[in-house]
Image: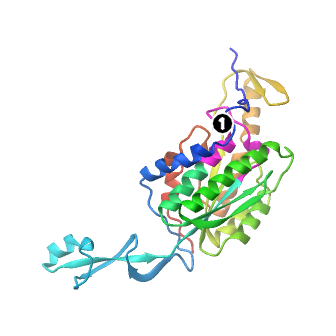
Amino acid sequence: MSATATQIHDRDLGITRVDLAELVALRARAAKSTVLRAHSTLSGGHASALRGRGMDYAESRVYERGDDARNIDWRRTARSGKWHTKLFEAEREHGLLLVVDTHATMRFGTRARYKSVAAARAAAWIAWTCVRAGDRIGAMAFGAVRAAVDLHSGTRGALSVLGALARCDQAATDADPGAAEPLSAALARAQRLITPGSRVWLLSDGWCTDDGAAHALARLARHADLRTVIIVDALEREPLRAGTYVFETASATRVVDLAGERARTQFGERMSQGWRRLAAACGQAAVPWVPFATSDEPDLAVAPLWRRRVRRA
């Protein structure tokens, strides 16, 4: 039996290259999502003790003249026989920084799209969801391309980030394939861009994970609500069938014989090193993470991580 796993040719927008129009269109998927706004319990967190028109319910009290009739607590009113109104916690604006990997290893894919394109789609969904929650959004690229976008709120903030993602993807195409930045160094840069209590989402395939990554993750997590989306290709995570696999790049073609079980096991172990290293580092640092396959949709695969509440001492 012969099987072929071919790296997708660099020709299709949205498959091997980031399509800005597609990132903008993900706004519709974010609008349909039922994700809840997640809060950390970091010191100096985001929820204010002020009572106002926010998203989190605080308490109910007896209705007073001038209260908004839309906030009437009907259950409390029915139980007590007196009109009651709901009060909500007024919330401060969050800041969310996307930290996106642009190493050459991200420009690979055997299912649906390159990992770099999958990462951009996940980042776009996060950006639109952030805007929907009324927060500020910014981005930082690391690896082959190093750039940053300041945090801004609203549609302006999202579009600034999406435009930067498309530009960084194009720049990564022309960058030196050997350009590298250890994850620990990238996280140190990210920490200098945020204020305590911010949220940080790391999107990477893990191949840049170095010995200092776990410590850097833990250090950043002490100052921010940190979450990680690990971008994985099927070839890096799923068992392989016996056969001959052909890998194509812009400059070469390589044939790999994986007919034997030992060869498949060794190949699978090598291919999975990146995401396993990052997952292990996140585990050591108690940073929540989720795998994101190149064929996944962000509103399904990333949403559970958005909803997850992170509790820290």
User: Can residue 206 be seen at all in this image of the molecule?
Assistant: no
> Where 304 falls versus 83 (above or below)?
above
Q: Nearer the viewer, residue 281 or 24?
A: 24
User: Can residue 190 be seen at all in this image of the molecule?
Assistant: yes
Tell me which segment is drawn in magenta. 101-121
Side of 156 where 173 appears, left or right: right
User: Which residue position holds label 1?
Assistant: 13
Q: Nearer the viewer, residue 151 or 45?
A: 151
**Which quadrant holds residue 140?**
bottom right
Side of 133 where 144 appears, left or right: right
The residue under the point 59% across, 62% down is: 157
**Which quadrant holds residue 210?**
bottom right
Q: Is 104 a magenta residue? A: yes
Q: Nearer the viewer, residue 157 or 280?
A: 157
x and y percentages locating residue 62 in the rendered image = 22, 83
Three-letter residue code for mark 1? Leu
x and y percentages locating residue 228 in the rendered image = 63, 56
> Where 238 falls versus 201 (above or below)?
above
x and y percentages locating residue 208 in the rendered image = 77, 51
The residue under the point 76% across, 57% down is: 183
